[in-house]
Amino acid sequence: MKMLRIIPLCFVLFAMLSCRETSAIFSGDAVARVGRVVLTREEVAAALPKGVAAADSVALAEAYVEKWVVRRLKLQEAELMFSSTAADIDRMVEEYRQSLLIRKIEQYYLDTDKSAEISEEEVERYYKAHKGEFKLKSPVVKGYVVAVPEQYRRREWMLASMRSTKAGAFKDVEQVCLKNNFRLNKFEEWTDVNDFVGYLPLVRSQKYDALIGKREVQQIHHNHTYYYFRVTDVLGVGDTTPLFMVRDNILRILTTRRQGELIRRQEQRMLEDAVQNGHATMDL
């Protein structure tokens, strides 16, 4: 603890030389010691980021020195407590080093072999062959939600246009929304029902079966606003999940499989070459 108490005194010089660069502040003498291991000011200076103001460099240096001392103390205590297992620790360190090197060479195989890439056609084939595995756990819908202020004088016309089967009728609604900055949310891709109703003034905990079961335009009046919405299509619980919703998952499956195959091919090639040229032998 005496050593720890004198550490701040090593930085009085830093404060006195606040106008000088960090490299000029530090010299080669020791600022901390744990046992026979010494930390020099030169080492602290090398560890600090370049271009830091002198005042900031003092704080950073103090933190670095304290962290260094604590780390050395932990190592010292660990060496005393676990000296009997030193051989096991060396073995684990070597195994970890080997694992890192093997992972690096395997990643090199993957990075340099374009056959590891998965095409969109492969994703679609996998999807078609495993449709039974992709089942919806909540409904998904297509449709739209339009929010119109209650004072808008052409509100009834908008409602009639949304109900119309005439070609281009909804395009007129879109133009009005764009012109008047009315909120229009179109869901042309399958969307989780909870995301759809999130644009409506509804209680999230309620059941939506009756709401999504209708195909006509529905409306809700809330807080001086009319919400017009229509569910144009629904996929229910247990139906097959659309491809775009599971594409990333399929891609991960295929990529993992392809990478495993590629690494096994490289291992087999390496083994055959080494045995053939006498670099490796196997006497089983």
Image: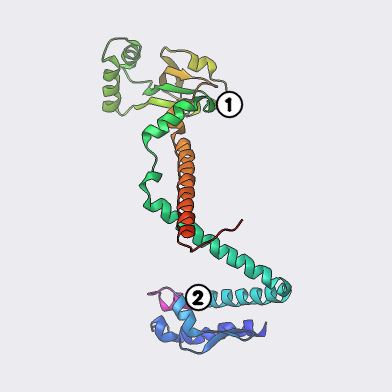
Residue at the image point whose x is 54% and y is 74% from the top: 63
Query: Along the polypeptide, which appears first: circle 1 or circle 2?
Result: 2
Q: Position of residue 253 (x, y in %)?
A: 49, 39
> What whole-number distance in Å separates the C-alpha atoms at marks 1 and 2?
53 Å
Badge 1: residue crowd in 10 Å (few <14, some 14–19, many ≥20): few
Secondary structure beneath disc 2?
helix
* Residue 139 visible, this angle: yes
Image quadrant containing the N terminus: bottom right
Q: Is residue 276 left or right of residue 84?
A: left
| In the rendered image, the vertical position of residue 43 relative to residue 226, given as above or below | below
Residue furthest to the top: 165
Image quadrant containing the C terminus: bottom right
Whether pointer 1 and pointer 2 mark residues with C-beta atoms closer than 8 Å, the reply is no
| In the rendered image, the vertical position of residue 265 relative to residue 56, given as above or below | above
Q: Magenta stretch containing residue 56, yes or no? A: yes
Q: Which quadrant of the structure image shows residue 87?
A: bottom right
Q: Which mark is residue 205?
A: 1
| In the rendered image, the vertical position of residue 217 relative to residue 223, given as above or below | above
Q: Which quadrant of the structure image shows residue 86?
A: bottom right
Q: Which mark is residue 197?
A: none
Q: Label 2 sits on what residue type?
A: Ala
| In the rendered image, the vertical position of residue 104 relative to residue 73, given as above or below | above
Secondary structure beneath disc 1?
loop
Q: Is residue 73 left or right of residue 9?
A: right
Q: Label 1 sits on what residue type?
A: Ser
152 or 219: nearer the eye? Answer: 219
Q: Position of residue 27 (x, y in %)?
A: 46, 88
Residue at the image point whose x is 48% and y is 20% from the top: 235
Give the magenta-colored segment's residue range: 49-60
For label 2, the residue is: 59
Residue at the image point whose x is 55% and y is 21% from the top: 238
Q: Position of residue 212 (x, y in %)?
A: 49, 17
